[in-house]
Amino acid sequence: IGLIPFFLAWGSFLNVVGYRILRDQSIILPGSYCPSCKHGLCWYDNIPLISYFLLKGKCRYCKKPISYLYPLIEFVTAASFYAIVLWIDPYYWLAYFFFFSALIVTIRTDLEQMLISRYATLLLIPFGWILSAIDWLPLTLYESVLGSIIGYGILFCVGHIFTRITGKVGMGQGDLELLAFIGSFTGPAGCIMTLFIGSTLGAVIGIAYISLFKQNRATMIPFGPFLALSAMTYSLF
């Protein structure tokens, strides 16, 4: 329980990383500020989860709404990292903290702008291979490399077939690179299960969203968060 404040603080940092990666800004300087009025935030306005609710989801200075993504990412980080501590062998904690952090950044960027940064996926694939090679992940180097290849290849094939049939782009490049990254940390089995769980979850939630909010079938729904959450679920259970 004592680790939860630290995990919430790390979630707050991941919010900064996701927000600034999209805008090609430094993740270190300047300090936290309101995205609307750019006013710097005091420490008491930057307490994970608590400040958001005390401020009723609005900036203290300009009164503009604060994105729901801030408390959401902080909560997901704390909950998933605490689950790692509870259910994963301590020998693998460092690798999974790294893996989950990248997935959470991806959730943030895909929900905000339907963009998945290669800084959080493609460029991190070698880390999965290295961690597997030194036995800091419960899979072999061969399984890690094969997982990356299968992850990219299976979505490439699905997207290509969809485009040939419908004439529309059905799968973004970021999704392919995300599943390749997931494969490097979970191997072929984890990659396939992640895709199965993510597709099922995405279909159910997508249909519900379209029905409840009266959207049409052409409405774009980000697939990255479903893949990321499914990869976390597979890793934990």
Image: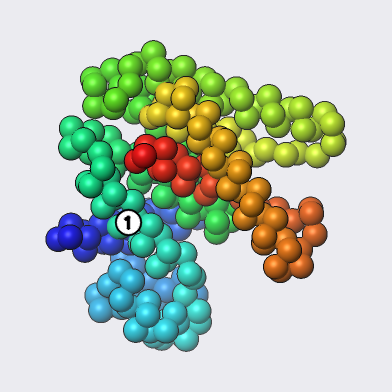
| Residue type at the position of mark 1 | Ala
* Residue 228 in the image, given as x and y percentages of width and height: 47, 44
Residue at the far front in the pictured view: 237
Identify whether 219 is placed above or below 41.
Answer: above
* Residue 79 visible (yes or no): yes
The quadrant of the image that shows the C terminus is: top left
- Using the image as rendered, state which of residue 197 and residue 170 is in the foreground: 197
Residue at the far top in the pictured view: 142
The quadrant of the image that shows the N terminus is: bottom left
* Residue 12 in the image, given as x and y percentages of width and height: 33, 61
Q: Secondary structure at mark 1?
A: helix
What residue do we see at 22% from left, 46% from top?
Answer: 85
* Residue 91 in the image, given as x and y percentages of width and height: 18, 32
* Residue 29 visible (yes or no): no
What residue do we see at 61% from left, 48% from top?
Answer: 202
How crowded pointer 1 is (Cα within 10 Å; few <14, some 14-19, many 20+) is rated as: some
Identify whether 188 is placed above or below 74.
Answer: above
- Using the image as rendered, state which of residue 128 and residue 32 is in the foreground: 128
Query: Horizontal placement of 98 versus 57: left or right?
Result: left
- Using the image as rendered, state which of residue 170 and residue 193 is in the foreground: 193
In which image quadrant can residue 53 be found?
Answer: bottom left
What residue do we see at 79% from left, 33% from top?
Answer: 163
* Residue 211 in the image, given as x and y percentages of width and height: 73, 63
Which residue position holds label 1?
A: 79
